[in-house]
Image: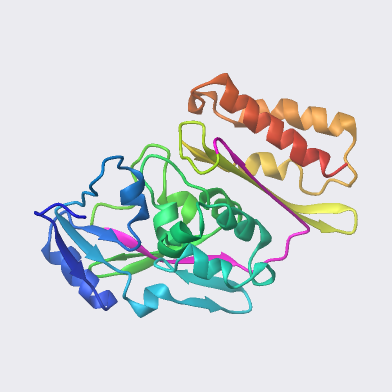
Amino acid sequence: MHNKNTTVYYANSIAEVGMRLKNIAGITIAAGCTEIARRQSGKRLYFPDQVVSIARIPELCTINKTERYLDFGSAVTLQNILNLGRKNLPDILYSAISGIGHPGIRSLGTLGGNISAKGHRLTSFSPLLALDAKLEIRTAQDSMWIPISRYFSNTGKEGGQSPQYISKIRIPTDTWDISWFRRIGKPGVIGDNSASYSFLVKLQKNMLTDIRIAWAGRFFFRQKEYENLMIGRTLPLTERDIQILLEKADLFFDKNLFSAQYEQQCILNLIEESLRMLM
């Protein structure tokens, strides 16, 4: 139930959303509204004063696949993504989304809503960060593609000054030889210790040609400089290789991001477990 002062506009096109953004200051964009509900614990559900729903816009509820990319409209539900089947999605994204909530939540929650939640990066964020996802950002007048790592920040200052929203999420359809996803924290609950970790590897014969390590929770990171230390190494890694790489990890992960030693130790343990897959 929304509060009596809420005005909800149901947009049927991208142009209608642009008109609302242009004419109504501070309007909130929503689709499944699961993130609004997640943040509230009372019996009543309260919306912002002005809301425009994008859940009925066909362009934002569509999935398109080309030879190089998968494009998801931001209002595509998590369940519709899973309905594509594991073989038609990057394995790491399928693993992450299949662990979100339960079928009822996934049938309402959208990919755009999951990655744009305020104050905490939710489950799909680290796979998309590792996959080098790009976001189509729309304003009232324009649209542009921005890497997810550049659009979001750990300071809470995201995007530009003009009212805007995510309209599409694009991921490359690359094949990965190793794909490993882990969620940290209490199942089904988003708390201070909730986070997700993603690890991707490409191999050519016995050589490591690409590696991605991504973390997302209260903050997110991908340290490409650290990843580059490993590219070109011959496999299997030795015990000494792993110890050296773990020692160097301290140089790349900003300790100011960690609120507790537990969080930092989780990351180092996951990196070690990942590297041991390459032995």
Residue 202 or residue 125, whichever sits in front: 125
Residue under the point 38% across and 48% down:
117
Report the front residue among 48 and 24.
48
Locate residue 52 relative to residue 39 in the image: left or right: left
Residue 79 x, y percent position in the rendering: 51, 66
**Position of 48 relative to 17 (above/below):** above
Q: In this view, does 191 lie above or below 104?
A: above
In this picture, residue 190 sits left or right of residue 182: left
Q: How many marks?
A: 0
Q: Is the magenta stretch mostly helix, strand or loop?
A: strand
Q: Does the magenta stretch include residue 82?
A: no
Residue 173 image position (x, y, % from top left): 64, 69
Q: Which colour scheme is used?
A: rainbow
- Residues rendered magenta in the picture: 164-186
Q: In which quarter of the image is residue 135?
A: bottom left
Residue at 64 percent across and 56 percent down: it is 95
88 to the left or right of 132 = right
Q: Is residue 29 above or below residue 41?
A: below
Instruction: Give the image quarter of residue 33.
Output: bottom left
Residue situated in front as seen by the camera: 156 or 234:
156
Q: Is residue 146 visible?
A: no
Q: Which residue is drawn at 25% across and 44% down?
A: 43
Residue shown at the point (88%, 40%) measured from the top left: 237
- Whether the magenta-drawn stretch holds residue 182 is answered as yes
The residue at the far left in this view is: 5
231 w.r.t. 32: above or below: above
Q: Can residue 78 be seen?
A: yes
Q: In which quarter of the image is residue 277?
A: top right
